[in-house]
Every structure is written in structure tokens, then in C-alpha cells.
Image (cartoon, helix red, strand yellow):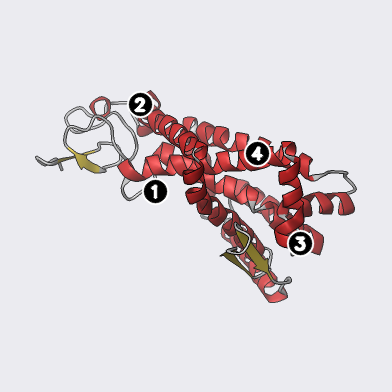
Amino acid sequence: METAASIQCPICAFEQAEGSETCARCGVVIAKARVGGRPLPGFSAVDVVPRDAGAWRILAGGLISALIAHAIPFFQFMLSPLVTLLHEFGHAATAWLLGCPAIPAFDFAYGGGITQHHDFQLPLGVLIGAGWAWLGWTFRRNPRTLAVLGLCAGAWLVAVSSEWRRELVIASMGHVGELILAGVLLSMALAGAGWRIPEIERPLGAFAAFFVQLQTLRFAWRLRHDDAFLAEYVAGKGGALMNDLEVIALDVKIWAGVSMDIREVAGWLMLLALVVPIAAILLYVFRQRVRDAWHSLLVLERS
């Protein structure tokens, strides 16, 4: 219901200040989507939003502000714990999923973070396997969902059934996890979904996403082109441990027989850091198809 102080978006029902041209949550142009308080015939949120510049302004603003923060050493240093937080969360979440209890933490001695994980715990592995079985039973009458679950459960079984594969996946999901989480933030910022105060949180989400991606790009670039930085990285926090990319390169070389060094792994990381924001933007542009596909996977067919 409209009041003197606020109006309601005709698409997503989000209340906002009167006079707003676009919805702060879904980005729809209110004047285009409403005639007498109702959406225009044939219009939907998905039809209207691509014509709205709000999401693209948020995208451009996030990128520009992240570039500025990344270029100023003080801001880069102050915001680096955000990247560490996402990085260690990726390690810890993956370790738990593979049956290895883990606790993420900041490293106040050498900087960055560290996630110590225990050896594989069979009861935890059996519990997670039972979770896959329960999902399969729940969606047993939806062939598409069952096929996706089967692929995911198969990949999990391959990873969890070998110590070196568990170690490889856990080591990989630090940097990969931070980029995936950054991609999720960017998708949420574009779509305007999942925020309590969208007009504030959407720009911040886009900024955080681009800052993480820029930090990852800089890190990988330095590993490839800065010999001193590479030597410091190989030293591994005073020689106490092997860093992620070194573990990945060594495991791939020993167990898969593929010769790969840290610089090559860093190159793949750079590529992923470029692919993730592009994927997030494509998901936004084609979000109706993505939403329909997602809803089709969640359908529980009744007998």
C-alpha cells in the first residue's frame, strides 16, 4: 500500500522512499512496471530489469571503487582480512564436506590465515554419504535433479575415497572458494536479492566481490612474474607448511603424472578470477532461464 512517505514496488513489493525511479531491491523501473498500481500486461521483473541502468551502475561503481581501494596500499592492507576470511572459509567448508573436521583462523604471526584440518573421520563421511542418499530419495521422481545429484555425489565419492584427492580438493578450495563466494556476492548485487538494506548493501557487495577478485589476480600475477615473491611464498610461513598452490602442483605431479609448477597453477587461478565475474554477469542477464532451470530441479514429482 502506498503512503505519503513510501511506495511499494509493483514487482517485488519492496517498500521504499516515495519518488524513487527504480526499485532498490529488484532494480525494476517503477514507472514502466506499474499502471494504476499493477504491472503492465506482458511485463515481468525479468523483462524490465535489463532495460534498467541501476544494476549496471552498481556493477560499474563496485569495480571503480575496488580499483581505487586496491591501488591505495593502506586500504588494500585494511581490507585484506576480507579475502582471508573467504579463503579460509573455503578450506574449512570443503574439509568438513570431505569428512575432515577443520577450524579456520587468522594467522597473526605471518599474516593471512591458516586452516588446520584433521584426518578423515569415517562416521562423518558416512553421515555426509547418507545425506546424498536422502537427497536422491527425496528427488527420485525428478530425473534431471537425480542426474545432477548423481554427478555431485559421484564427484564427492571420488574425492573423499583417497587421501591425496582430499588434500588436493581442500587445498584448491581456498582460492577457488574465495572466488566463488565473490561471484555469489556479485550475482546478489546485480539481482538485488538477499539483502536487508539493498540500497546500501548492493553497492558494498559489488565492491567486496571485485576487491576479492582483484586481490586474487594480483596475487597470481606476482607469483608468475615476481621471483622474490615466489621465493617468499615457497618458504611457507617460515618453513612450517606448504602453501596451497605448492600442494596442488606437487599432488598433480606425483599422483596424476602431470608436470606442473606453481607459476602454471597461478596462471589457471588468474583465468578463474577473470571467468567468475563474467559468469556472474551472464547469470544475471539470463536469470529467467537460470531461475526456470533451478525451479525445475526443485520440483518434487508426486506419484
- Say what amino acid the circle numbered 3 marks: Gly
Which quadrant holds the N terminus? top left
Of all residues, the one furthest to the left in this rendering is 4
Residue highlighted by disc 1 = 194
SS type, badge 3? helix
What's the CA distance linking mark 3 and mark 2? 53 Å
Q: Quadrant of residue 99?
A: bottom right
SS type, badge 1? loop
Q: Mark 4 or mark 2, which is nearer the start of the sequence?
A: 2
In this view, the mark in front (4 or 3): 3
Residue highlighted by disc 4 = 272
Residue highlighted by disc 3 = 239
Side (left or right) of 277 relative to 252: left
Residue at 72% from the left image edge and 55% from the top image edge: 243
- Say what amino acid the circle numbered 2 marks: Asp
What's the CA distance linking mark 3 and mark 1? 42 Å
SS type, badge 2? loop
Q: Position of residue 136 (x, y in %)?
A: 62, 59
Residue highlighted by disc 2 = 52
Residue at 62% from the left image edge and 39% from the top image edge: 218
Q: In this view, does 113 lie above or below 273?
A: below
What's the CA distance linking mark 4 and mark 3? 28 Å
Q: Where is residue 150 in the image (x, y as percent from the top left)?
A: 68, 53
